[in-house]
Amino acid sequence: MTTADALTLVVQWLHDEAGQLQQQGDAALAELLLRQALELMPQHRGLYPALARCLRQQERTAETEALLLRHLAADPQSAPGWIGLAELERPRGRWQAAIDHYGRALALDPDHGGLPRALRHTAGHLLPADDPRLDGDPAALLASLRPGLPQRLLIVLRSEEHTSEL
C-alpha cells in the first residue's frame, strides 16, 4: 500500500466517523474530525459539504454559507454543495432560492440520494400534503414549483399561519 492510498483510507475513515457522530448529534466532534481530514487532504471535495452540515447543525449559518460558497467557487459541479445552500435558505423562508439551488443540484446529479427527499420536504411547505406531485418525479415537482412560486407561497403561509402578514 502506498502512502497516498493510506492517506486516502485515513481521510475516508475520518469522513465516515464524522458522519456517524453527526447522526448521533455530536456535530462538534464531527467537525473536528472533518477539519483534521481537510488538513490531510484539502483537495477532497466531499469533505466540504460534510463540514457545512456540521456547522449548520451547530447553527453557525454565516460560517456554513461562506464555506459552501468557497466550495462551489472551486467546484461548481458539486450537487451536495448546491443542496447545502438550499438547506440554508429553507429556514430563512427563501423558498425560491432553495428551489433554484435544488434545481442546480438536480441538473448536476439527478440520482443524488438525498435530493428527492430534500426537494419534497421543501415542496411540502408549499403544497397541500395530499398533492400527488409530492410523490412524483423530482424533476417534474421542481418544474411545477418554479412558475408563480411567490404567490403560492403567500397563500400557503397565510393559510397555515392564519395571519395576514408574513
Image (spheres, rainbow, N blue to C red):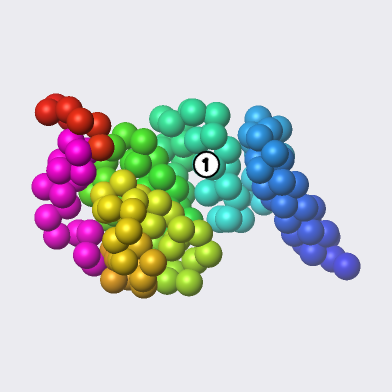
The x and y percentages for residue 74 are 44, 54
The x and y percentages for residue 17 are 75, 47
Q: Tell me what residue is drawn at x 55 percent, y 29 percent.
A: 58
The three-letter code of the residue at mark 1 reads Ala
Of residue 11 and residue 165, the one placed in the foreground of this image is 165
Magenta stretch prevailing secondary structure? helix
Q: Tell me what residue is drawn at x 22 percent, y 65 percent.
A: 144
The x and y percentages for residue 125 are 31, 46
Residue 158, by quadrant, is: top left
Look at the picture and state if 159 lies above or below 148: above
In the picture, the quarter occupied by the C terminus is: top left
Q: Tell me what residue is drawn at x 43 percent, y 54 percent.
A: 118
Of residue 71 and residue 164, the one placed in the foreground of this image is 164
The x and y percentages for residue 139 are 32, 70
At mark 1, the secondary structure is helix
In the picture, the quarter occupied by the N terminus is: bottom right
Segment tinted magenta in the rendering: 143-159
Does 152 lie within the magenta span? yes
Residue 160, by quadrant, is: top left
Report the residue marked by disc 1.
52
Lateral position of residue 15 relative to residue 109, left or right: right
Is residue 77 visible in the rendered structure shown here?
no
Is residue 129 visible in the rendered structure shown here?
yes
Lateral position of residue 35 relative to residue 64, left or right: right
Does 137 lie within the magenta span? no
